[in-house]
Amino acid sequence: MRPVSDLPGPGDVVDGFRIGERFHAGGMGVIYRVTGPDPGFPMIMKIPRLGPGEPASSVISFEVEQTVLAALKGPHVPRFVAAGDLERQPYLVMEEVRGRSLKEWVGDEPVPLDEVVRIGIALATALHDLHQQEAIHLDLKPANVVFRPTGEAVLVDFGLAHHAHYPDLLAEEFRRPIGSAPYIAPEQVVGARSDPRSDLFALGVVLYELATGRLPFGAPTTPGGLRRRLYRDPTPPRALVPALPEWFQELVLRCLEPDAGRRHASAAQVAFDLAHPDQVAITERGRRRRAAGPLTLFRRWIKAAGYEPAPLALPSTELSGAAIVLACIATQHTNEAQFEAIRQTVRRLLSLQDARRLAVATVIRPTPELGGSSADETAAHQRIKHLALLRHWAEPLALEAGQVSLHVIESGDPAQALVDYARANGVEHLVIGAPPPDVPLRGILGTVATKVALEAPCTVTLVRPPGRR
């Protein structure tokens, strides 16, 4: 991999793409306009930030966006062009959607209702198309929506998305809320990422913001602040803008229901209601003039304390719900004989059931976010190095992209980290290298493999290379 100081910039050519002016710089990466083999539309290249101080999560988000965007099509997403090798130079080339960002509409003053409705229909239509392709955006906000000159809404930035055909790397590696605080759905706050109706909650936040000039739940910065949306009502839109009709408030507050089961069943239903306001049945939501009182809030708070969402899973392939085999590879220690023995065992297990999915994991010591004195010591680069080793280990198995996922786990306790991963992700069978035969009994009892075998909530196979049994 190129060192941080030598990352590509304007004037450089990367795999046939000439880098032009900088288009945008965000928290996860830098975007440049590029030219190259002409696909018939303007292109941009996204390069993830991997320098000192950059978290390893930027690498995971880049992997997610690269995988999900390549699987999508249609007018509501940027067209995928190419992706760079993660080990050599990671990048993502896609269509530059030239149009107006939804962020330009957002301000302190309400947007006229007819304009809000037009925007809402376009957004709901885009979300429905995305959900039909078995994907969820999970980071819908004004900055991530661009309107084509023809009027279609285009969803951008899929770094937090989930696609039913592929492993959810973010859910498998981070057990905490992931998203933009003002727009994140209650079920996302508690770690659920498989419900398309999470995007409908974010759509409700956007509609509320456009129509009132305010965010319904503010911009919380603490876990407690995020959890308030599990039990607190927002101020009814009509209490802020009395001219808003009851049908619009009914629709928005339905999108903002803490229980996903009380929201619309699909984005298509939201689009229909926006287009046919006379068909919206008005309930107490539409007539509400104030938020719930203290007693109601207390009851909801008690209920929210034990809140466990029951998300509606996306229609998925048989592979998505497949049993998981976890291969544990000690990438810090090269032992080709043992690596091959584990590979052979995994190959046999996968052959027993076509629907099984393989997760390949290693555990490394936590890397300080500020990294070391060189680029290769940063958290992001350490993650990429070990991902590359896992990828090389898995390549001889010749598995399809959706059948294998790679995971670098940071922990000071490797055994506990592997046990926790197996428990959190429903692993059916775990394969790990056995302790060497010459280790004394007391030493064996203290090894990572032995601890995993004793504590893992699944079948565990300890593997030794031939000739060392």
Image (cartoon, rainbow, N blue to C red):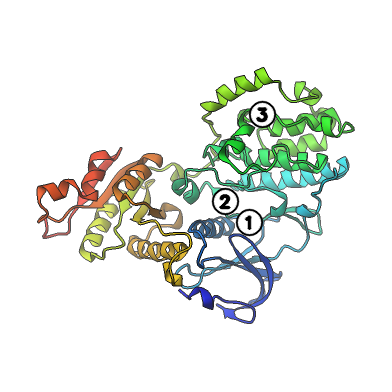
- Label 2 belongs to which residue? 160
Q: Residue at x 47, y 49 (%)?
A: 167
Residue 29 in the image, given as x and y percentages of width and height: 59, 64
Check if mark 2's residue and mark 1's residue have beta carbons within 8 Å.
yes
For marks 2 and 3 on the same chain, the one whose residue lies earlier in the sequence: 2
Q: Please indicate whether residue 2 sits to the left or right of residue 395 in the image.
A: right
Name the secondary structure under disc 1: loop
Q: Which amino acid type is marked by label 2? A: Leu
Label 1 crowd bin: few (<14), some (14–19), many (20+), radius 10 Å: some
Residue 209 in the image, given as x and y percentages of width and height: 77, 42
Q: Residue at x 53, y 27 (%)?
A: 305
Q: Nearer the viewer, mark 2 or mark 3?
A: 3
Label 3 crowd bin: few (<14), some (14–19), many (20+), radius 10 Å: many
140 in relation to 75, above or below? above
- Label 1 belongs to which residue? 157
Residue 149 in the image, given as x and y percentages of width and height: 81, 59
Q: Which amino acid type is marked by label 3? A: Arg
Mark number displayed over residue 232:
3
Cα–Cα span, label 2 and label 3: 26 Å
Quadrant for the C terminus in the image: bottom left
Residue 430 in the image, given as x and y percentages of width and height: 29, 46
Report if residue 364 is visible in the image. Answer: yes
Q: Which amino acid type is marked by label 1? A: Asp
